[in-house]
Amino acid sequence: MLSAEEWEILRLSLKVSLAAVGLSLPLAFGLAWLLARGRFPGKVVLDALVHLPLVLPPVVTGWLLLIAFGPSGPAGRFFAHWFGLVFMFRWTGAALAAAIMALPLMVRAMRLSIEAVDRRLEGAARTLGASPWRAFWSVTLPLSLPGVVAGAVLGFARSIGEFGATITFVSNIPGETRTLPLAIYSALQIPGREAQVTRLAILSVLVSLAALILSEWLARRRKGAGHVL
Amino acid sequence: MSFEIDVKKRLGDAQIAVRFSADAGITALFGPSGAGKSSILNMVAGLLRPDEGRIVVDGTSLFDSAAGIDLPPNKRRLGYVFQDGRLFPHKKVRANLLYGYELADDGDRWMGLDEAVDFLGIGHLLDRWPATLSGGEAQRVAIGRALLSGPRFLLMDEPLSSLDRARREEIMVVIERIRDEMKLPILYVSHDRDEIARLAGTVVEI
């Protein structure tokens, strides 16, 4: 069915996307929380910044990442120095690019579900002896979980499909940054690779479909949570 | 004195200013909708901060702007029964009942689950989801949840208003028993004269 090379591409794609979602999940939830509940000057600016990757040409996002996270960029130097983490031309960079591109979708889904939580239930929890933290963990978070799951699935699907920012930031290196879309693009450049293109395209469909089915299953396991999508 | 309350709060264009003290039993806050009765309960609960004033329950200061006292809701040891029950929709009845019980300090609890379930007649509801309960059932569970958290006093915000006549009578009997057998001071909001005449010892017009 799949060649060793294609298995490698699939494995890399899953690794990059899972890392991207894992990396951005807490950040996305924190941002969603700030945007849903926070009242502070500059909220409009933060909202716009979060949504920027959604509206910018991906190649511009990739270029900005190159400037910030490249070896001489401020963020790049910071991570290299303190964590020994290098992004450029590495799978970690592909994960970073995917995370940035997925962030707006994740924040939107989570923000909606946080806004939908009845805050009076948190008040009820407080009168029953819950600290603000306890009320968050036992009431707000479980009630907004469908949105968190939906956000994670959307983010994962977006990460699997990420192309423009990735190829700009970390190039198209087999085994390191050549994820499914980049592999399809590469195969399209070479005459006679149509069969591989077809197989990789079908693979993309199957991975995305599996993510959607998994999220529906997760949503159904939770009583009363309803549909994710 | 069970309740000594003297608070001021500006909410939008409305100015709430109320001052009263009341003995044990049920103290009713009576007045038209929109007069700020629920806001007063929320101030006593700690969910809404008065601009200034004092809230003392059974000799304990819960709020005192002059002395800089403002206990958070979870330190006030109260039980709040809301108009709509306000049960946690993601927890079954048993978990709703035990929510405050499990958060209370050992010495603060004065009622166990079995006792509360018998008192309210809700044994058959323990494994149900709140969404499947009738209004009267939900209100019984809400009262049980409040009692099990080991409160020193109760706040009730129109607990009967969403119920039909027969259910009203049932819950009213429960409230009378809480007043007479458990001797809990209750601050009770309503706009129903008959209800107040039957339950309350003190009436505060808002």
Image (cartoon, coloured by chain):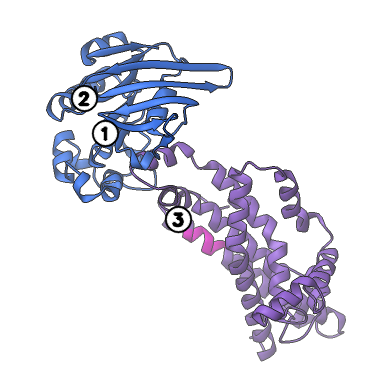
Q: Amino acid at mark 2?
A: Ile
Say if labels 2 and 3 share a chain. Answer: no
3 vs 1, front mark: 1
On residue A220, the disc is 3
Look at the numbered disc 3 and give the secondary structure of its residue.
Answer: helix
Q: Indicate the colour of chain A.
A: purple
Decide if residue B113 is on the left or right side of residue A78: left
Identify which residue is drawn at 73% across, 82% down: A90
On residue B175, the disc is 2
Magenta stretch holds residue B131: no
Identify which residue is drawn at 22% across, 14% down: B201
Q: Position of residue A17 (x, y in %)?
A: 64, 72
* Res. B148 in view: yes
Q: Indicate the colour of chain B.
A: blue
Q: Amino acid at mark 1?
A: Ile
Chain letter for the residue marked with disc 3 in the picture: A
**Total marks placed:** 3
Rate crowding at label 2 as few (under 14), some (14 to 19) or many (20 or more) other CA atoms within 10 Å: some
Residue beneath disc 1: B143
Q: Which residues are magenta?
A: A212-218
Identify which residue is drawn at 59% across, 62% down: A25
Say if labels 3 and 1 share a chain. Answer: no
Pick the residue in front: A127 or A4: A127
Alpha carbons under labels 1 and 2: distance apart: 9 Å
Rate crowding at label 3 as few (under 14), some (14 to 19) or many (20 or more) other CA atoms within 10 Å: some
Alpha carbons under labels 3 and 1: distance apart: 31 Å
